Amino acid sequence: MKVYLDNAATTPIDFEVLEVMTEALKLNYGNPSSIHSVGRIARNAIETSRKKIAHILRASTSEIFFTSSATESNNMAIHCSIRDLGIKRVISSPTEHPCILNTLKAAQEYHGVKIEFVSVDGNGNIDYEQLEQLLADSQLKTMVSIMHGNNEIGTVSDLERISKLCEEHKALFHCDTVQTLGKYDIDLSKTNISFLSGSGHKMYGPKGIGIIYVNNNNLIQSLIRGGGQERNMRSGTENVYGIMGFARAFEKLYEKREEFLKHTGELRTYFKAQLSSSGLDIVYNGNQESNFLPHIINLSIPVSDKTDLIMFNLDIHGICASAGSACSSGVEHESPVLAAINAPMNRKAIRFSLSHGTTKEEIDYTVQKLKEIV
Ligand code: PLP
């Protein structure tokens, strides 16, 4: 049996999205910058896709740009706001994705930008009062970079609250929404967000395509220079079928978001109930009562000679899960997120992440194998 429970690392592609993309690959081959009819068809497909995305986010089409990945979008938001908007300080959290943490490190090293981290509690919730204090404490032009849903432990931050704090203190707000885009209703007309990032392959869309929302008030220039595509904001010939795939995947997931949250929420409860009656010694990482992504279950079991090779053994039984943040590398290393929440060192963490296609049978099989291995 093959059980894919690593949907936070990447999702399988939705076949309807694949169809849109293969059709485009076959027929819509024009260069969108060409002014002839074939080029214009490709341009049209891009602009229609942009419109769909802007509509869902209640943004203007002029605020949406296509990139190669959320990693690129996050790099762009941080580097360009420092370079072009005079940002001198970034407040972030220790539980951010490596593409934020490593970019901040580089910004500090190369541009002398001050980086400050808000504390997180044992479930990864940021300290909002400390954030307010930090914002009030300095006259330096500041950007807050805090993610919406955590990719490892599923903790969800309060976008409205952070956005209000940023507004009150005239700080910019950059938000990595990779794990929540399409699953949550993010209304940019009501939320004061300066930059937002998203990735196609976390939404049942293709890999190698991302978006960045750049609020019209923040006039940054491009990170990648060249032929001036994307209205001079991101050069490089556009990934037409990727863009079309992104838009269709986003649209589809957004339409079914309530079903997605309900299904994964019910399965999560079922999974936890089965684990509880299995007699396994389990501790959960991240919020369990509220403010969590239902599809991400991060649990830990006591370290022993049997759990040493647990990921390998699960894999032998056809179960795909993740030990830490799987999208960084295939190598197991200590997760900075688990370190930040002080997860016990004598336990081994496993992240199972569900999809709308996950079944109870797959959960039963996983619990049974987990019990056998441990
Ligand atoms: N941000 C978060 C929260 C993620 O989970 C990931 C990937 O796992 C990324 C950013 C990077 O996205 P991409 O694979 O599009 O570069």
Image: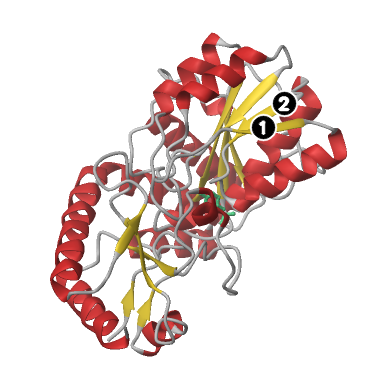
Classify the position of the C terminus by image quarter: bottom left
Q: Is residue 280 left or right of residue 353?
A: left
Callout 2 secondary element: strand
Residue 164 percent across, percent down from the top left: 46, 16
Quarter of the figure with residue 2: bottom left
Note whether ligand 1 is within 8 Å of mark 2. no
Q: Mark yes or no: residue 197 visible.
A: yes
Q: Give the number of the disc on residue 89.
A: 2
- Residue 29, above or below 307: above
Q: Mark 1 Cα within 10 Å, few/some/many (few <14, many 20+)? A: some
In the rendered image, is residue 354 in sight?
no
Q: Quick one: 357 or 151, which is closer to the camera?
A: 151
Measuring from the top left, give residue 78's x and y in whole percent. Answer: 69, 35
Quadrant into which the N terminus falls: bottom left
Along the line of sight, the residue nearer the viewer: 278 or 326: 278
Could you tell me which residue is drawn at 60 percent across and 69 percent down?
A: 329
Quarter of image, res 73:
top right
Q: Secondary structure at mark 1?
A: strand
Between disc 2 and disc 1, the foreground one is 1
Q: Earlier in the sequence, mark 2 or mark 1?
A: 2
Q: Amino acid at mark 2?
A: Arg
Residue at image position (25%, 59%) is 356
Report the amino acid beneath label 1: Glu
Give me the C-alpha separation between circle 2 and circle 1: 8 Å
User: Do labels 2 and 1 touch, CB within 8 Å?
Assistant: yes
Residue picked out by circle 1: 116
Q: Position of residue 172 (x, y in %)?
A: 61, 21
Label of residue 143 in the image: none
